[in-house]
Amino acid sequence: MTTGVFASLGRWRLLNTLRLIRGLPTINLHTTRVAMIATEAEFDRAKDKLKTLQRDPENEVKLQIYALFKQATQGPCNSPKPSMLDFVNKAKWEAWNSLGKTSKEEARQKYVDLIESLVSAEVLTQNKTTATEDLTASFQTLKVTTENNITTIMLNRPERKNAISITMYEEIMKALKQAANDDSSLTVMTGSGDYYCSGNDLANFTNIGPEGVEQKSKKSAAQIRMYVSHYIDFPKPLIAVINGPAIGVAVTVLGLFDIVYATDKATFHTPFSQLAQSPEGCSSYTFPKMMGTAKANEILLFNKKLTATQACELGLVTEVFPDSTFQKEVWKRLHTYAKLPKKSLVFSKQLIRGVEKEILHSINAQECERLSERWLSEECMKAIMNFFEKKAKL
């Protein structure tokens, strides 16, 4: 019976902490079976446990910890109210003063309960993170990790220069959906090895199967449309860390990212007309919007390859870093961004993206319809055959 009571008390403490952090009123637990008075030894142990927390509690929780500690050790607030301009000490004084005539013993118990709840909540979070990482082990073409409020989706086919196969398309969509619903604040996409991504794996065009060319074309276009929709609808800040050359669809969807950081060794190439195809990833809309029609035409129509610096000047890339310090500098920034209030980031992105989300979905549909037509054209088939013939001669 006693074990059941203490298990219930543990759940109550955790629930109250989570409600406090979310700004909800705490729940009062009434019990006539157990006298809830913490001993001095339990109070000391709670102080030690507080030091073991890997993440600082939010400010409101810190103030409650401070107030309960002062009340438990000194009794009701007996110091003069700090100046209005002394914001920090004024907030501490108000938190302590709000406890009124709460006894030292009751404050000691509440302090112990709060610390226990914080420790339990962190253990649950760590377990959830571990479970997420275990789940991502099922990906064949990606490495997906969640750490320090950042979910990282790493394209992981370095032997194929991270070319996007049919399987990778499906897995990226799965990873984006998972990241949209996890507890992280940011999602980062990057590549494994020397390339960020070499675009569409052209083996996708050779594996026709029993469905036939026409059905294959329609199915592929539908997959691309769904793939791009995941970027359009992604609710959190989405950041590309371009570690090397980017080609094709890996470039065109960058207009749907919130930030694009690139090493100075990166290049950006969209060789659509060489393969008798047409743009995707909403680039027929985002590229002219960000860089002007003439510059966008050079890239999307005439296959101009951009250096990282040129891409930055045109607005496709946010900032370029020396390759020697690229990872260090970028991740330092990302860790700083990840500490920002998550809901604020999400709501702000909704305001920015919401204005044109309907337009983007419409553009995406038009581009994919055109792609399906292009894939069935004799011109496209000849271009792809020529590509494979040239590649075989190398």
Image (cartoon, helix red, strand yellow):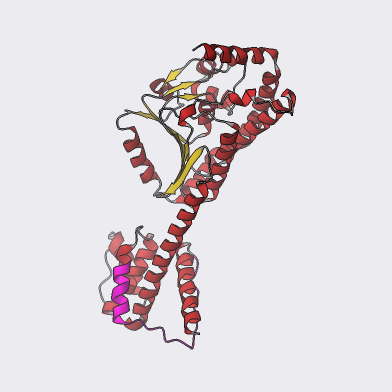
Taking the image as drawn, is residue 84 in sight? no
State the residue at coordinates (52%, 37%): 141
The number of numbered badges drawn on the structure is: 0
Q: Quadrant of residue 176?
A: top right
Tell me residue 292's x, y (percent).
51, 20
- Residues shaded magenta: 24-49
Compared to residue 71, the image places residue 207 above or below, namely above
Q: Quadrant of residue 34?
A: bottom left
The residue closer to the viewer here, 381 or 79, is 381
State the residue at coordinates (54%, 14%): 392
Q: Quadrant of residue 283?
A: top right
**Which secondary structure is most common in the magenta stretch?**
loop
In this view, the residue farthest toward the bottom is 32
The residue closer to the viewer here, 25 or 19, is 19
Magenta residue check for 258:
no
Taking the image as drawn, is residue 143 in sight? yes
Tell me residue 15's x, y (percent).
49, 69
State the residue at coordinates (50%, 66%): 24
Compared to residue 185, the image places residue 22 above or below, namely below
Magenta residue check for 39:
yes
Tell me residue 259's x, y (percent).
45, 35
Left-right relation of 89 to 135? left
Compared to residue 189, the image places residue 1 above or below, namely below
